[in-house]
Amino acid sequence: MPSITRRRPSNPDGRAAVEARVLAATERLLQEGVRFTDLGVQRIAAEAGVARSTFYTHFRDKSELLMRLAGTMRESSFDRTGSWDPGGPGDPLAALTEVFSDVIRIYRTYAPVLAAISEVAAYDEVVRAYWAGGLEQFVARTVEKILVEQQAGRTPTSLDAETASRLIVYGGDRFLADHVSATSADPETDATAARELAATWWYGAYRRPS
């Protein structure tokens, strides 16, 4: 997968400001309902108030731009789920439900970006590998947590940590993306979605009956 990193600029503050404008402009256009594949670099640059040539000094192409947008969402949701401890004090299931409530809010905020990822990943191997790579990191983190719970005797050893983790992570990602999509975007159902997703993780993996 090609690198999306670049040489450090001589004016990092100015560069960051321009990149932030381009990212914000792209988010606005996606929020307005423009499909990412129909969104040209010229239109993005015009919306951001920069020259087309300036866009290409900051982003290799539209795929890099999309990955940068998705990276913000991914880091926010991963950080939130990473803070949950299945063996922690209090009611871990209630805490997990709260985590997923926050994650749903993040997914809602970035719903147009998620739609763009799904759209572009169908034909762009770089974007597809980027998103899958993030999910694989989440799988690895989940495996570690389940193994700790198994060693502590709280999760049955009969559960296959790798398979179960892949199931709940990939399944959860697809569920969340569908839940916040335009066809089923009803915020009134968010609490139910968070509760059911948390219960599926909890009783299907972490506290599966022996």
Image (cartoon, grey):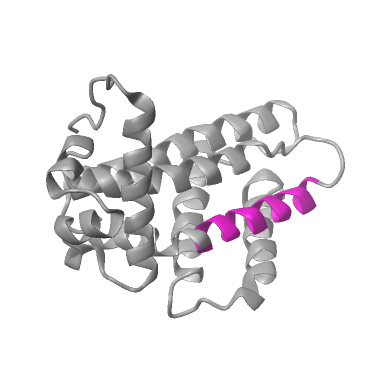
The quarter of the picture where residue 154 lies is: top right
Q: Residue at x 28, y 19 (%)?
A: 10
Q: Residue at x 36, y 34 (%)?
A: 16
Q: Position of residue 184 (x, y in %)?
A: 49, 78
The residue lying toward the viewer, choosing from 53 and 148, is: 53
User: In the rendered structure, does residue 106 fall within the stretch colored magenta?
Assistant: yes
Q: Position of residue 100 (x, y in %)?
A: 64, 55
Residue 94 position (above or below residue 152): below
Query: What are the residue bounds of the magenta stretch?
Result: 92-108
Q: Position of residue 58 (x, y in %)?
A: 23, 37
Residue 168 position (above or below residue 87): below
The residue lying toward the viewer, choosing from 200 and 30, is: 30
The quarter of the picture where residue 87 lies is: top right
Q: Residue at x 64, y 54 (%)?
A: 102
Left or right: where does residue 121 sit relative to residue 31? left
Q: Is residue 132 visible?
A: no
Left or right: where does residue 100 sit relative to residue 22? right
Look at the image and tell me in which quarter the N terminus lies: top left
* Furthest-left residue in this view: 53
Q: Position of residue 33 (x, y in %)?
A: 34, 73
User: In the rendered structure, does residue 96 fall within the stretch colored magenta?
Assistant: yes
Residue 23 position (above or below residue 158): below
